[in-house]
Image (cartoon, grey):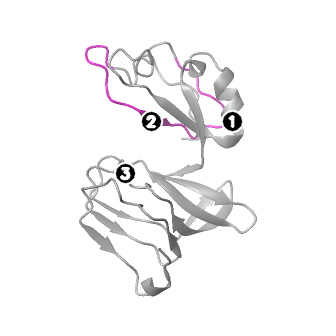
């Protein structure tokens, strides 16, 4: 969440066999306090490297913060629920760039999202947006979707049903 100020020691770390967290999304603008063992080891003992995705305008803060700076820090769009969006502030439009949910079998892409008090129309889905969704079986598009990039489910074998809105003929792929 936006107001997380601290993440406890060993919160996401499993010292026995390392867990498989390869991407960690943080929506807090200010880096929460973390400890040496909050996240999995980034030393590669188990071949796992964790990338931390943070709000674009906070990139430098995380790259300089204690313990955060030990990880690969990358900018991301806005995290809303289990979706990551790239927002266009000029047109108040958003593109879904990644789905980060792990245990949902059915997901409906929202028509709009609200970020920092602004409402954005969700108009697109980026390529590879659903690659990490290994449990997801049913994906329902929002009425507002106009553009779907090539390969948006290219590396996903779990999605079996895609529900397109009645105006689906307006979607460009």
Residue 6: in magenta span: no
Q: Earlier in the sequence, mark 3 or mark 2?
A: 2
Dot 1 corresponds to which residue? 58
Q: Residue 164 versus residue 9: which sits nearer the camera?
A: 164
Q: Residues within 10 Å of mark 2 (few under 14, many from 20)?
A: few
Dot 3 corresponds to which residue? 131
| Residue 20 in the image, given as x and y percentages of width and height | 33, 29
Residue 30: in magenta span: yes
Disc 3 on helix, strand or loop? loop
Tell me the distance, in whole angstroms, between the alpha carbons under discs 1 and 3: 26 Å
Give the tally of numbered discs.
Answer: 3
Q: Earlier in the sequence, mark 1 or mark 2?
A: 2
In this picture, which residue range is highlighted in magenta?
14-34
Q: Residues within 10 Å of mark 1 (few under 14, many from 20)?
A: some
Q: Looking at the picture, does residue 101 appear above or below residue 141? A: above
Dot 2 corresponds to which residue? 23
| Residue 151 in the image, given as x and y percentages of width and height | 41, 61
Q: Nearer the viewer, mark 3 or mark 2?
A: 3
Tell me the distance, in whole angstroms, between the alpha carbons under discs 1 and 2: 17 Å
């Amino acid at each position: 969440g936006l107001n997380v100020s601290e993440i406890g020691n060993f919160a996401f770390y499993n010292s026995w066999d390392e867990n498989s967290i390869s991407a960690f999304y943080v929506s807090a603008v200010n880096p929460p306090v973390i400890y040496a063992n909050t996240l999995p080891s980034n030393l590669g003992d188990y071949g796992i490297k964790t990338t931390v995705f943070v709000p674009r305008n906070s990139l430098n803060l995380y790259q300089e913060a204690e313990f955060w700076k030990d990880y690969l820090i990358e900018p991301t769009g806005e995290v809303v629920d289990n979706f990551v969006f790239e927002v266009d502030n000029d047109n108040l439009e958003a593109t879904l760039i990644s789905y980060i949910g792990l245990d949902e079998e059915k997901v409906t892409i929202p028509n709009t999202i609200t970020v920092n008090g602004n409402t954005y129309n969700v108009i697109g889905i980026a390529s590879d947006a659903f690659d990490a969704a290994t449990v997801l079986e049913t994906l329902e598009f929002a009425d507002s979707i106009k553009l779907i990039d090539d390969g948006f489910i290219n590396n996903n074998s779990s999605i079996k049903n895609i529900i397109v809105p009645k105006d689906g003929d307006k979607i460009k792929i």
